[in-house]
Amino acid sequence: MSNKENEYKELFISEASSSVEELNNLMTRLEKSPAEVKTIDNIFRITHTLKGNAAGMGFEKISKFAHALEDVFTEIKKGSLLLDSEIFTVLFKSIDILTELIDSINSTDANVKYRGIQKKLEVLVENLRKKESAASQTLKTTYTRKSSTTKKTKVAGENPSELQETIDKKNKTDLKDTGNAITEVQDVAEVVVTEETDTKKITFSDVVQVPVKKLDNLLNLVGELIIERDRLITQHENNVSRNEFNRLKRVTSDLQYSVMDVRLVQVGFLFNKFHRVVRDAATSEGKKVDLIIEGSDTEIDRNILQIISDSLIHLIRNAIGHGIEDSKVRQSAKKSESGTLTLSARNESEGVVIDIKDDGKGIDIARIREKVIQKGWVDANAAKNMSEDEIISFIFEPGFSTNEVVNSISGRGVGMDVVKKAADSVGGNIKVTTEAGKGTTFTLILPSSMAVKATLLFEVGHTQYAIPLAYTDAVISVHKSKILKMQNRLMVSHLDKTIETLFLKELFFKGEENVREKAIQSDEKWQIIIIHYNGKKLGLIVDKLLQQKEIVEKPLKKPVDFVKFISGVTILGNGNVCLVLNVPQIIQKLFNYSLNVNATAVA
Amino acid sequence: MEKVKEANTRAEDTRKFQLVVIRLGDEEYGLHIDQIKEVVLTPNITRLPQTPNYVKGVANVRGNIIAIVDLEEKFGLQQLIENQQKKDNYTLVIESEEMKMGVLVKEVPNTLSVTMSQIEEAGNIVQDGQSDQSYIKGIVKLDDRLVIMIDIFKTLSENEISGIFKMNKQNAAV
């Protein structure tokens, strides 16, 4: 297949997918208010366009399937088909099939079973038509026939005989009409004709669709450009005046931000898909749930949106499955019969914040506490003293969720560690607030762009490292006398909290030289970076703090991509490689290790 | 029949190909020239945690970030050169479709033209049970020189590097 053809195919797929998505939304809306003519009209229009496009591209299956769907909506439009729950089941199913058909374009082996449902749609229409021909013609049917005929003319050439047939039919019905009706029909015809001439003009949209791959590539190149710029500037800093590079600096920064800006998409793009998710989840649970979407015009990097989309679905399903109670329980709790799920996005200084809020029963903290003790992660006394937030953070522990008992008791926490991981992987964070009886809110804090990371640079053993600011709590400088020793561990107190502290060098390059002794002998203050992840804090002792810097991170490549403590690297102005610390991994590793030790000690 | 076969083998035997010879300890190792991308002055190396000692770290070579390894350390050849001051001036950049890395060498490598007949199959080498030595492909004998042919990617496969690291960790844990 040539490149051009491929590009057209890609375009068709992206257009068709968004059409189907819109169909899903309209259908859910239609289910709620079946009398809305506008919704039906929109659905009709979309299926029609899809049919035409698919035929043009030579995707016969999709075209025919869309045609069948279109026919059903012709009948719905006429009002001759009553919308009941059974019809909706068939319609939703057929939209699913349509999605599958579109998806199967790109895979060669896919074998979508579409005939059954297509037949069902066809039979539905056929039965109605039979009934109809028996009944007398009304003004209303003429009306729709007329417009559907003209619409069919647009795709003329596709099936001339069919066209002829419809024209014949139209003529017949026209004859039967009274004079009054004819004028009305002419009005409609006029509208349709002007519409037609409009579409005949070739218009160019102001929007260009670009494959994400190309954007990724562009962003990589810009990243390299920035690194190269920094290198050059550092190299020539002493020889030429600083102003020499100002223009270069400005242009490259502008370029970087422009490219980042291009990659931003509105979250509504993803949020709109959730109408269907909510509807399906609510139906299968037998609950009533209303979805409210706020701030859908908030912008976020497309790749980040993609990575967290599964997590959002997960959180939504959880909220419906375990958070929101069924109508009976709600009524007895004096709540509105149907639960409300609010999905909201907004821009804040730390990035994009997405809230998934339900008005359900809230998380049962006591149950989690019980479970944590039972698992031996924390002993009973310690657990009693832990704050609610600390207890809740356990739902993000891997292994917490896999236990069946937890699912049936506390309900929450199914695969929460996966959600957490997804947020971490883009440098984001997740928080939970819950109030018994009132509901739970999950808050995802995500960077709006993955391209640059705000980091703190520091030095250990003449090597520079970077640590993402997202995980950095504070930087403190203390004299060794303020450090407490507990067994073999070092503790530092910061804001009334005692935090375990260790030498980064000891963690990274174990047993090489006696870092600790050296540090204890010297009288200088220790530089400690306090990092946090999932409610756990840790102090890292480093040699020297340098500066804050926005960096472009590159992943580690084979054969060293298994190194967990490092999430990636960046190239510094002097051409040296700077390692970026993977805070989630470091904390998880250290704390899991101590968790295990505790568990075995208890056992 | 027999003759044709013989002729074939002979044609193969006389076909020449190029080896890049590097000196590790006081042994000579040969790498297939196709695997080598370039030789550069060793750049600044940044140490990487969670890797075995012979992985010296990562470095920036023309904008690419590659792992740098010390084969002398990997092969345990260091004690032989204890007194000699170690200078790893050059880095041999090797590349396959999957990965790219650098090998430290003291001097610019030579090339050597050999024919197939000069290579002795590796089958005759005693496999020491401790470590997998399947990376040794053969031995080239030239007058008084002995060049060990190795498959560089087998030596430094990901499994090898991460596997050994895990082993060390287990030992440390015990």
Image: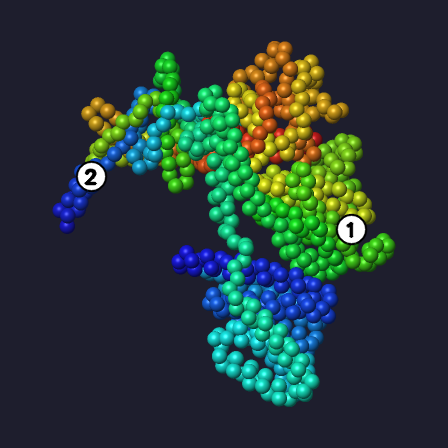
Residue ID at (21%, 27%): B142
Query: In terms of secondary structure, where does tag 1 sit?
Result: loop
Residue in view at x 70 percent, y 18 percent: A484
Q: Residues within 10 Å of mark 1 (few under 14, many from 20)?
A: many
Q: Position of residue A63 (x, y in %)?
A: 52, 69
Residue A137's spot in the image, x, y percent?
67, 85
| Residue A358 vertical position relative to residue A516 in the rendered view, above or below | below
Tell me the residue that label 2 is attached to. B15
Q: Position of residue A300 (x, y in %)?
A: 61, 45
Residue in the image at 18% along x and 45% along y: B8
Q: Is residue A331 left or right of residue B133?
A: right
| Number of on-image labels | 2
- Determine if residue A358 is in view: yes
Name the residue beneath numbered marker 1. A360
* Three-letter amino acid code at the position of disc 2: Arg
Q: Is residue A477 left or right of residue A6?
A: right
